[in-house]
Amino acid sequence: MTTLVWFRDDLRVADHPALYAAAESGDAIVALYILEDASEHIRAHGGAARWWLHHSLRALADALAERGVPLILRQGTTEVVLADVVAESGARTVLWNRRYGQGRHHDAALVEALGADGIRVRTFIGDLLFEPHTVATQDGGAYRVYSAFWRACTAEREPAGPLPAPRELTPALSQPRSDALDEWALLPTSPDWSGGLSERWTPGEAGAQRRLDEFLSQRAGRYRARDFPAEDNCSELSPHLRWGEISPRSVWHAAVDATGDIGLFLSELGWREFAKHTAFHFGPLHARNLNRRFDAFPWATDSHGEVAAWQQGRTGFGLVDAGMRELWQTGFMHNRVRMVTASLLTKNLMTHWRVGEAWFWDTLVDADEASNPFNWQWVAGCGADAAPYFRIFNPELQQQKFDPDGHYVQRWAPDSDAVLRIIDLKASRARALDAYQSLSG
């Protein structure tokens, strides 16, 4: 018998329930990844994400090859590709790890279509600690407040332990044809702007495990000071989690055995869970306001090039400019700085949060369909458990508090003091608050 394992945002071999089940069954295996760049159920990858995907797929292909199975790459419409690969391989079972955003509706349709052709489908938990259908309010609804949500998740249980990576896999005798990864042209070439990404990141499962090990052994004890962007106190696991190169269960159980302020670190995994649960119940989050009152918010038009100045890190505010340039060069930005840059755009400049979310979607290596818009809506004041709209981050005060010696700003935007500020903080704050009051009037 042949079993097809369909990889999605779970590009690993350890704690991969679908792959583990295929190995335990003793069946011959076909491993498949499908590139479907854009459809009604899939948001097209941004440029930084495409760079990461290329290298992550290369690493996954190597890991599977070491275990005896090639990774089949196919591009096209998922329904067509799955049907073709099933027919070419003679697979009678298809396994995958579940999705929780808009893709879950597509998955349900695929189960039905494959079942109609006599193909058995089994799905597994792979991307969350606690699945949405297992966490609900007393009346059976969805949580909208993070603290209550996380208490409900963790009060009387903890995540299941991670599964080991299969040591050896049995390849199907008839392997379908595969695209060459380079044919997909995921890497930038004209120009190649990825040098800073290559210097900072090692995509793939091995890189994810090294980053986790280094964090737990060297930085976890300093995690409470994570808000200082010049200091190396954070895990920077978010892109590895986004691509499923390491599972949240593996991170959780490794962390609980370590020292340091692990409860605080685990709560950040909880925030990721909260974003995905919110997307499950109310998504797609990038397409509309969770708080529908904000549908009437009088967002400003970009009449003087403020958005371009923000994107380029030329606002005249050191912490903002440093963050935006770090993002452009490395595909990443410190979380505290993300909040400050997003606040300036959505509140002081009164630019729609979707503009900023789209920019981050294109430039972040950890851009996730749930977390990215969820966090933008949180800062903008229209999301789940959002910060009050009147909480407007002052970038000057934030820099004084979290980069008091100026090391972060000096590293990424040493000329920021010479850049003319694009907005008056006091006047723009008052304008934003007046606009918010208009929603209540």
Image: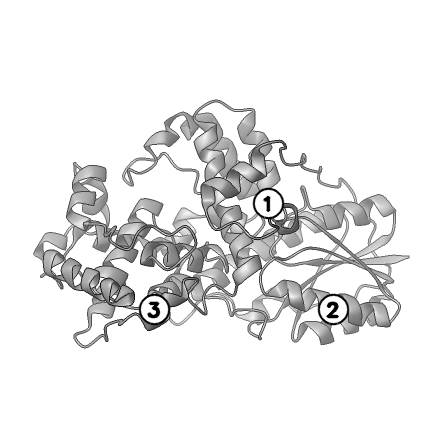
Q: Nearer the viewer, residue 185 or 24?
A: 24
Q: Which residue is mark 3?
A: 355
Q: Secondary structure at mark 2?
A: helix
Q: Secondary structure at mark 1?
A: loop
Instruction: Report the residue at 22% width, 55% height from top.
Output: 321
Instruction: Report the residue at 52% width, 40% height from top.
Output: 150
> Quick check: 116 left or right of 65?
right
Residue 313 makes an appearance in the image: no
Task: Check if mark 3's residue and mark 1's residue have beta carbons within 8 Å.
Answer: no
Q: Which mark is residue 110?
A: 2
Q: Nearer the viewer, residue 32 or 376?
A: 376
Q: Which mark is residue 39?
A: none
Name the image quarter holding residue 438.
bottom left
Expressed as whole percent of the image width and height from the top left, the position of residue 53 reads 54, 59
Nearest to the eye among marks 3 and 1: give it: 1
Instruction: For marks 3 and 2, give the CA distance.
Output: 33 Å
Residue type, label 3: Val
Q: Quadrant of the N terminus?
A: bottom right
Instruction: Report the residue at 29% width, 66% height from top.
Output: 439
Q: Is residue 426 above or below residue 207?
A: below
Residue 120 makes an appearance in the image: yes
Q: Dot 1: within a 10 Å radius of its alpha carbon, few (fewer than 14), some, or many (20 or more) residues?
A: few
Residue type, label 2: Leu
Counting residues from the start of the chain, the first of labels 3 and 1 encountered is 1
Counting residues from the start of the chain, the first of labels 3 and 2 encountered is 2
> Quick check: 86 left or right of 51?
right
Q: Quadrant of the C terminus?
A: bottom left
Q: Which residue is mark 1?
A: 138
